[in-house]
Amino acid sequence: MFEYEGMQTAAALRSPDERGDRGRGDREHIGRNGAARASDHVGAARAALDRITALRSRVADMEATRVDTEGLPTADALAPLLPGGAIRAGGTYSVPESVLLAQTMLQAASAAGSWCAVVGVPSFGVEAAAAAGIDLERLVLVPDPGDQWLAVTAALADVAQIVLTRPLGRVVPGDVARLSARLRQRGAALVALGSWPGADVTLRVTESHWSGIGQGHGYLTERRVTVTASGRAGAVRPTSTELLLPAADGSVRAAVPVAASAGGRVLRPVAVAS
């Protein structure tokens, strides 16, 4: 027969040193598990914050009415292509192919006294910009921002009313949402020379014809194009208009309908030039 008071557990029979070593091992194991759980929590919190930021951006976009939103000065040639006939403060626009078309997005705002910025477009011609009416004294050029193009674009959105940038690499939804929020806060607009996720309007040159060359001689004088505008997820019904990009005098303006224009030889190029 055994007495209860006389019984001892295996843990009690161990020496104090053994018990101390076991305790330290347990604490180290718990510490490692705790650090791993903390890291998981931080990652989950960051992912949740990105989702919340993106959701806020979507809600703000749905609440904003395109008619009532303040419009920035816009070239007359582009008005038929844009909702409300103007570039929207806080809006994002994609121009996948044509530098000249993207430059025209800056023209009216610059002529009205607004600051404009161009990031990552080394082919942007300063002389051509000046001839188009862009004020060079209020133009910030960053031809080669390297891998910091997104940070530079976001910083210039604080001082410029329209920022033209060429996206370099993949743009993640979280960056798009944060930059869109910044644009709305500052009342600026973004024009991407290339694709841009969730752009309010995308402007594409869908047809192009050069004129000016006669029977195998002469000079190219002007380019007649069809520009088609489309919105994200069908928010903007696709619409098209014909522009002279450029006209014979170097300007960009609406094209006169072919039936009403003077007869002349029109050549279709092999590839679209910008």
Image: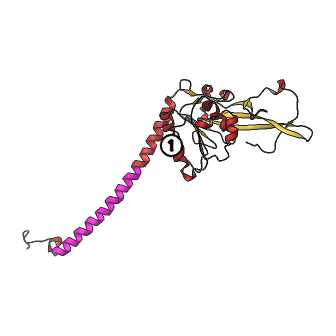
In percent of the image, x 57 and y 27: which residue is there? 71
Residue kind at label 1, given as amino acid type: Ala
- Does any portion of residue 25 appear in the rendered image? yes
Residue 46's spot in the image, x, y percent?
Answer: 42, 48
Is residue 20 shown left or right of residue 233? left
Percent across and percent down for residue 83 are 61, 28
Residue placed most toward the observer, 221 or 128? 128
Work out whether residue 203 can be spotted.
Answer: no
Residue drawn at 17 percent across, 71 percent down: 11
Name the quarter where the N terminus is drawn.
Answer: bottom left
Residue that appears at 42% across and 45% down: 48
Is residue 274 inside the magenta stretch? no
Q: Residues within 10 Å of mark 1 (few under 14, many from 20)?
A: few
Q: Main secondary structure of the magenta part?
A: helix
Instruction: Note whether 73 is above or below 137 in the view shown.
Output: above
Q: Position of residue 94 (x, y in %)?
A: 62, 39
Quarter of the picture containing the C terminus is: top right
Decide which of 191, 80 is in the foreground and name it: 191
The colour mode here is: secondary structure
Image quadrant where residue 249 sits = top right
Q: State the extent of the magenta-drawn residues as a range.
A: 16-44
Give the quarter of the image for residue 67.
top right
Q: Secondary structure at mark 1?
A: helix
Instruction: Determine whether, in the image, residue 49 is placed left or right of residue 62.
Output: left
- Please provide percent x and percent y for residue 204: 69, 38
Q: Say which quarter of the image contains residue 126.
A: top right
Answer with left or right where residue 13 lies relative to residue 61: left
